[in-house]
Amino acid sequence: MSRTDDQATAVKAVIERLIENVSSNTASILDDTYHDDMTVIMLSPEDEAIVLDKQQMTETVTKTLEQNNGAIGTWARFHHVSVNGDTAHVLLSRRNELTGPNQQITLGIDLVNQDNRWQITREVIVTRPVS
């Protein structure tokens, strides 16, 4: 396995750990994984763009956990993971309670390796009906 493959595996593990921890009501992982200058851009099924910063996204996830008795769901399908030096990109699909029943989200996630850890700098989320 090449160094780039090792890095891609490490980046994928960061996202898997985030999904697992949030899904088991350990939202504190968000502070370590979300970069302080993170931006989330969500496109709703109604084509409405919603832009959130780190604090707003953390509050959204925490509120959803509270409304769903600490459960969000772990279903994920990774489509692509790439690393270029200290930046990475992940493309994956998810089904969870954050977007509601019968919805699937596709996420484009940008990360930077800073302070000896991979941190999410941007998420672009598109919501669509489960196909």
Image: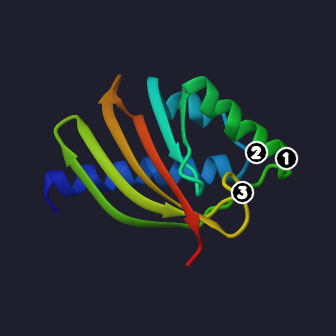
Going 83% across and 52% down the picture, which residue do you hit?
A: 68
Q: Is residue 95 above or below residue 87?
A: below
Q: Is residue 54 above or below residue 78?
A: above
Which residue is denoted by mark 3 in the rendering?
97
Which residue is denoted by mark 2 in the rendering?
64
Q: Tell me which corner region of the image, top left, top right, bottom left or bottom right, holds residue 117.
A: top left
Q: Is residue 90 above or below residue 122?
A: below
Going 27% across and 44% down the picture, which residue do you hit?
A: 88
Which secondary structure, mark 3?
loop
Badge 3 vs badge 1, beta-carbon distance below 8 Å:
yes
Q: CA distance from mark 3 to mark 1?
A: 9 Å
* Residue type of the residue flagged with mark 2: Thr
Q: For this rendering, which residue is in front, 11 or 56?
A: 56
Neighbourhood count class around disc 3 (C-alpha, 10 Å): few under 14, some 14–19, many 20 upward? some
Question: Which of the numbered marks, if any, corresponds to residue 79?
Answer: none
Badge 3 vs badge 2, beta-carbon distance below 8 Å:
yes
Q: Can you give x and y, in whole percent of width and height, for residue 44 in the image?
A: 58, 51
Sequence-earlier tag: 3 or 1: 1
Q: CA distance from mark 3 to mark 2?
A: 7 Å
Q: In the rendered view of the protein, which quadrant contains the C terminus?
A: bottom right
Q: Is residue 107 found left or right of 131 in the rendered image?
A: left
Neighbourhood count class around disc 1 (C-alpha, 10 Å): few under 14, some 14–19, many 20 upward? few
* Residue type of the residue flagged with mark 1: Gln
